[in-house]
Amino acid sequence: MITDILLLAGGLVLILAGANMLTDGSGDLARRMGISDLVVGLTVVAFGTSAPELVISVISAIKGSGELAIGNVVGSNIFNICAIIGIVSIIRPMKVKPSIMNNEIPVVFIAALTLWVFGNLAVWRGGSEMILTRWEGIYLIGCMIYFMYYTVRKARDTQDNDPENQPQEAAKPPMSLVRAIIYVVIGLGALIYGGDIFVDGAGGIARAMGVSEAVIGLTIVAAGTSLPELAVSITAALKGKPELAIGNVIGSNIFNIFMVLGVAAAIHPLSFGSIGNIDLVTMLVTSFLFWAFAKFYKVNIITRLEGSLLVIIYIAYTAWLIINA
């Protein structure tokens, strides 16, 4: 048990450090190739903060732990909305731009709805278990590619029409080419090795505690892999930049379902195991509340009260998981 905890903690440290190095190194390489800071933020940074989920889910899929892969994503998305948006809104009510409320946040709900439908298709067809097939995984990847294309094209059009949105030269001097490459290589290596021992540790803890890998994935693994998003969002809120916190959560939740589970399922079909409709519907409902809180009551603002309700939902859901473990 102690060894498993050490593996879990050590893997998490390597994952977070690797994601940070990979983001810095690949971001610098992208700028050297003439890619704007905006596009880097929409691609490299989005990948960087969701890299822990991607690595763990892919390795889990390869090792046949489908419920850990799916639990990681479902739990992370619930954590991102309820805990991160909730805590940030309590710290400082979050202003939501109308364009984000009408265009990007609904995609978070659509992604959650798509996963719920795909998860139940096999059962509706008379199957005995919920499963995410390889073809469904490929479809999810296609959705991610289209969303990125649409977002980047829209952002470029906005820049072209608004001089104030033109990318500025980074105040931070670029690292050397050799250093950037080293960061990418070491970061990728840390992610892969850290993800491998993290999955082993999580599985060992689940067996030692007599609970399913799904519960571990929905709680410990999900919260651990969402630390980059939590750190970025709280820092953004304290600096008076709530739009960064919102964008971080939106991008992460969409990336988690479309890309993380898409790639994992394309590699190996994922069985949901003990992850059921209660977990998927919780993700679906919280995704809807994310949009509804911004749309109604105090329009374009997620208030402290609404943030508190999100945190309460997360606490109640986690308590339900532990009681029924």
Image (cartoon, rainbow, N blue to C red):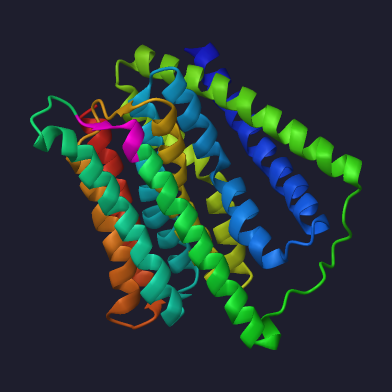
**Magenta-colored stretch includes residue 40:** no
Q: Nearer the viewer, residue 96 or 86?
A: 96
In magenta, the rendered stretch is 130-136
Quadrant in which the C terminus appears: top left
Q: Nearer the viewer, residue 122 or 171?
A: 122
Q: Is residue 52 visible?
A: yes
Residue 200 placed where, x, y %? 49, 17
In this view, 94 is above or below 137: below
**Magenta-colored stretch includes residue 132:** yes
Residue 58 placed where, x, y %? 48, 29
How many marks can you see?
Answer: 0
Locate residue 267: give its quadrant. Answer: top left
Q: Nearer the viewer, residue 160 or 17?
A: 160
Residue 171 placed where, x, y %? 84, 67
Q: Hey, which residue is sitting farthest left in the picture?
A: 126
Q: Is residue 233 left or right of residue 272?
A: right
What residue lies at 76% left-to-right and 33% top-to-bottom?
185
What residue lies at 37% left-to-right and 76% top-to-bottom?
102
Q: Nearer the viewer, residue 321 or 225?
A: 225
Q: Is residue 218 visible?
A: no
Residue 256 placed where, x, y %? 44, 46
Locate residue 190: give its quadrant. Answer: top right
What residue lies at 42% left-to-right and 68% top-to-bottom?
104
In this view, 132 is above or below 2: below
What residue lies at 46% left-to-right and 60% top-to-bottom?
147
In this view, 88 is above or below 14: below
Locate residue 174: give its quadrant. Answer: bottom right
